[in-house]
Image (tube, rainbow, N blue to C red):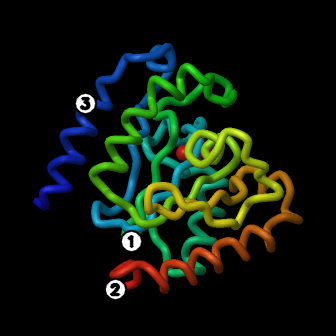
Amino acid sequence: MSEKNEEFQKLKEECLACRSCGLCETRNNVVFGVGVDNAEVMLIGEGPGENEDLRGEPFVGRGGQLLDKMLAAVDLDRHKNIYIANIVKCRPPKNRDPLPEEQQQCIRWLRSQFKILKPKIIVCLGRIAAAKIIKPDIKIMKEHGQFFEKNGVLMMPILHPAALLRNPNNKPAAFEDFLKLQEKIKEICDHTYD
Ligand code: URA
C-alpha cells in the first residue's frame, strides 16, 4: 500500500465517524470520495444526493452518469486518473443546498484530502463548490471554463451535471470546458493519461 493510500484510509476512517454537524443525523452513508490516490486532477461537487447517500459514492445518479460520459470523452475516469469529492460529505435533507455552517464544519475533510493528493488542477462542479473553493462571488454562467490560479493550483468552475440535465442546451458549452481541461492536462500534468 502506498503512503498516500494509507493516509487516505486513515482519514476516511475518521471522516466516516464524523458527527460535527446535524447532517450526521439523517445520513445513510458518509460520502468520502472516490478516485485514485495519485490523481493530478481533483473534481469537487457540492454534496451527496439521494443515490450518493445510499451508495456512499459521489456522483452515481443520473447527473453522475452524464459526468462520467463527459469525463470519458476526454480520457478521464474515476477509477483510473482522477479523484472526486464533495464540499459536504453527508446528504443535506431533500437535497437542499448545504448551509454555510455545514460547509464550514465539513471543509476540513476536503482540505485534508487536498493535502494528501496535492492535485495540479481542481475542477469545481457548479456554483456552490466554485463559490467555496475559487471565489465567493463567482458568476458560474459567465465564468465557467476559465482557469483561476490560487497558490500554484489551477482551478476551473464548470456547470453542474444536474443543471445540464435540467437545461440540456448548455451541454455543448459544458463539453467545451472539458476540452479546455484536456488541453491543460496535456500541458501541465505528468502522468494523467499514462
Ligand atoms: N451532486 C453533487 O454535487 N455531488 C454529488 O456527489 C452528487 C450530486
Q: Nearer the viewer, residue 62 or 144?
A: 144
Q: CA distance from mark 1 to mark 3?
A: 25 Å
As shown in the figure, which amino acid type bears the numbered disc 2? Asp
- Counting from the top left corner in percent of width and height, residue 56 is at 42, 40
Residue 149 relative to residue 115: left or right: right
- Tell me what residue is drawn at x 45 percent, y 42 percent: 55
- Counting from the top left corner in percent of width and height, residue 102 is at 53, 23
Residue 194's disc number: 2
As shown in the figure, which amino acid type bears the numbered disc 3? Glu
- Tell me what residue is drawn at x 57 percent, y 83 percent: 183
Q: Earlier in the sequence, mark 3 or mark 2?
A: 3
Residue 186's disc number: none
Q: Which residue is mark 3?
A: 14
Quarter containing ligand 1?
top right
Query: Under 8 Å from ligand 1: the CB of mark 3?
Result: no
Q: Which residue is mark 1?
A: 81
User: In the figure, 73 relative to 156: above or below?
Assistant: below
